[in-house]
Amino acid sequence: MADPRPQRRPIIAIDGPAGAGKSTIARRLARHFGLLNLETGAMYRAFALKALRLKISLGDGPALERLAAETSIRLEPGEEENRVLLDGEDVTGLIRNPAVTDAASQVSVHPRIRAWMVGLQQQLGAAGGVVMEGRDIGTIVFPNAEVKIFLDAAPEVRGLRRFDQLGPAHNAQPEEVIRDLRARDERDRNRPDSPLHPAPNAVLLDSTHMTLEEAVAAAQAIVIAKLGSAGSQP
Ligand code: DC
């Protein structure tokens, strides 16, 4: 007899360090397979922006927890990047600068902040049909995701990609960008709660020697191998 329970649409989890190409690859996969793209890093960034604005110490877990209790963060899928609403304000254009980037990594260390974010992310992806990218999607947020990809690349390559993305308006040397990225990696990989690491059943994709197009093609092939050519199941 057919199972009467409605089947959830698939979840594709993409995790990995900064600059590995997660956002672009997640966006391209979502478009290709007709899924929603959700960037969880943008949620940590929006919360970090609020903490910076209110001058709350990024190391003060209880103060951040109180702040979280009176904060609403919404993520809306968009054609290019996600739209992020912080207490109703569209902060999409304000969360990519280096100060917020570093602060996002700092606030994400606190277990209660993580628990709050994970709950929000689980609600967002509950119906499936999403490509969700971050650091702990395949390990904590959706351990039962149908497809898990851990995307990585050598730190120098990731740093140079980030440098190119920042563009000439950003007054930094490539070495500085690589140094900041290494520091953030270090923190994201070594925090006691949900450190960045591949889920045991994740497929590892190292894009060090790949062009973006090659990495996208490799990621598509991983999805097709897991889900079949349609990618998105009913
Ligand atoms: O992906 P990103 O660079 O926008 O993420 C910003 C920071 O947020 C990152 O340094 C660590 C944190 N983060 C996290 O801890 N867990 C996630 N699922 C996504 C991001």
Image (cartoon, grey):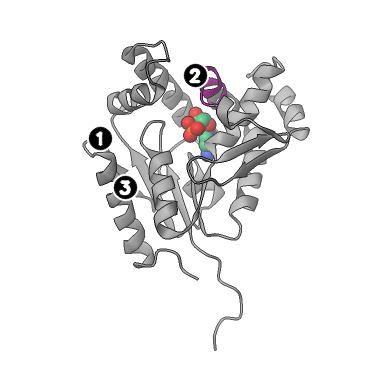
Query: At 61% across and 57% down in the image, what residue appears?
Result: 126
What secondary structure is marked by label 1? Answer: loop
The answer to which quarter of the image holds residue 147 is bottom left
Q: Which residue is mark 3?
A: 216
Q: Is residue 43 magenta?
A: no
Give the number of the mark in front: 3 or 1.
3
| First in sequence: mark 3 vs mark 2 | 2
Q: Are marks 3 and 2 in contact (CB under 8 Å)?
A: no
- Whether residue 67 sits left or right of residue 79 in the image: it is right
Is 192 placed above or below 57 here? below
Task: Name the foreground residue: 68 vs 83.
Answer: 83
| First in sequence: mark 1 vs mark 2 | 2
Q: Which residue is mark 1?
A: 208
Query: At 78% across and 32% down in the image, what residue appears?
Result: 70
> Given the image, on which type of amino acid does mark 1 rest?
Thr
Q: Which residue is mark 2?
A: 98
* Whole-number angstrom distance, CA of label 1 to CA of label 2: 23 Å
> Given the image, on which type of amino acid does mark 3 rest?
Val
* Whole-number angstrom distance, CA of label 3 to CA of label 1: 13 Å
Q: Which residues are magenta?
A: 96-104
The answer to which quarter of the image holds residue 205 is top left
The crowd level at tag 3 (other Cα within 10 Å; few <14, some 14-19, many 20+) is many
Q: Is residue 191 visible?
A: no
What secondary structure is marked by label 3? Answer: helix
Is 130 placed above or below 7 here? above
Label drawn at residue 4: none
Query: At 37% across and 12% down in the image, what residue appears?
Result: 176
- Whether residue 106 sits left or right of residue 15 in the image: it is right
**Number of numbered tags placed on the structure image:** 3
